[in-house]
Image (cartoon, rainbow, N blue to C red):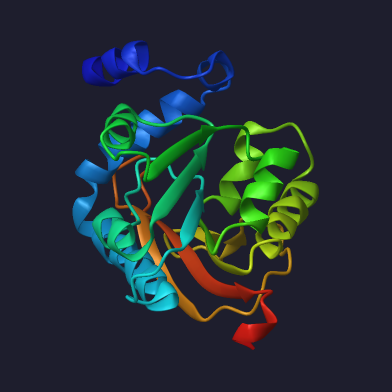
Amino acid sequence: MILELLEWAVTPCPWFARRNGLLAAQIGIRHRVKRCRATWNGHLEACRKFVADAVGSRTADENLVILGSGHLNDFDLAFLQRRFQKITLVDALHPIEIQIQASLSRGRLRLITTDLSSPTAEIEDLVSRSSWTISSCLLSQLPLFSNEDSPALFDRHLALLQKSPRAVLISDVAKRLGSAPWESLIENHPLPHPAAEWSWLISPPGESVPDPEERLVQACLMHSDPSDS
């Protein structure tokens, strides 16, 4: 707890990210990943593999946009930096270690700080000019830090991804506690047909509640470039 408070105090970020709990949530994820490594590794590896298979290993003069980049736990950054000439990370705040990596990247790793619940024209333009755009484990989180209705947030995010020539969407879509029935995290909002699906034990017994919490994750490919069809 003391380490989390210190990190909260020294992390450079917009005031709104402190006020609405985004910074505290992001710091909490860092420590939760360490505590739950055994139950999170399968999910994180599945995310990395899906992205790697989608974008391929061919090195090209292309650019990548990652929406809701966070700590990049679910990305193989070294692989992506070999694959793409330029990567832009977009989030409401960027952890200190990511800020340091960007400062040492000679411009190949760019950071944009913005509220993705309401993308600006700049972000829409950035995505439309990208070679690939990836949204991983972000969609279901948008309503947590917004007062807007969930369906509008989901529609806006999907519309943003559709502006990209090629896009990957990975999201947890449902949760269940113990043996209870699955409960939708996206209010049964229609998503593109999943190319892959897996379960994620996000909270083992005793982590936050007595019963374990499991998530259902879906990964989708979205193409708007006619040359890919």
User: Looking at the figure, which quarter contains the C terminus?
Assistant: bottom right
Which of the two residues, 98 or 49, is positioned nearer the viewer here?
98
User: x and y percent of residue 83 in the render?
Assistant: 34, 65
Q: Where is residue 71 in the image (x, y as percent from the top left)?
A: 35, 41
Q: Which of the 4 image quadrants contains residue 189?
A: bottom right
In the displayed structure image, the side of residue 64 where residue 209 appears, left or right? left
Q: Is residue 51 above or below residue 123?
A: below
Out of 58 and 218, give the one closest to the viewer: 58
In this picture, residue 138 sits left or right of residue 7 = right
> Which residue is drawn at the image coordinates 56% and 75% (left, top)?
221
- Residue 195 horizontal/vertical position (percent): 52, 81
Residue 179, compared with residue 65, is above or below; it is: below
Residue plotted at (38% across, 61% down)? 84
Q: Is residue 183 above or below residue 91?
A: below
Total count of labels: 0
Q: Position of residue 89 (x, y in %)?
A: 46, 43
Where does the N terminus fall, quadrant-wise? top left
Q: Which of 160 and 193 is in front in this view?
A: 160
Residue in the picture at 69% in, 39% down: 122
Q: Please identify the residue farthest to the bottom as the structure is shown.
A: 229
Asked whether residue 158 is in view, the answer is yes
Res 127 → quadrant:
bottom right
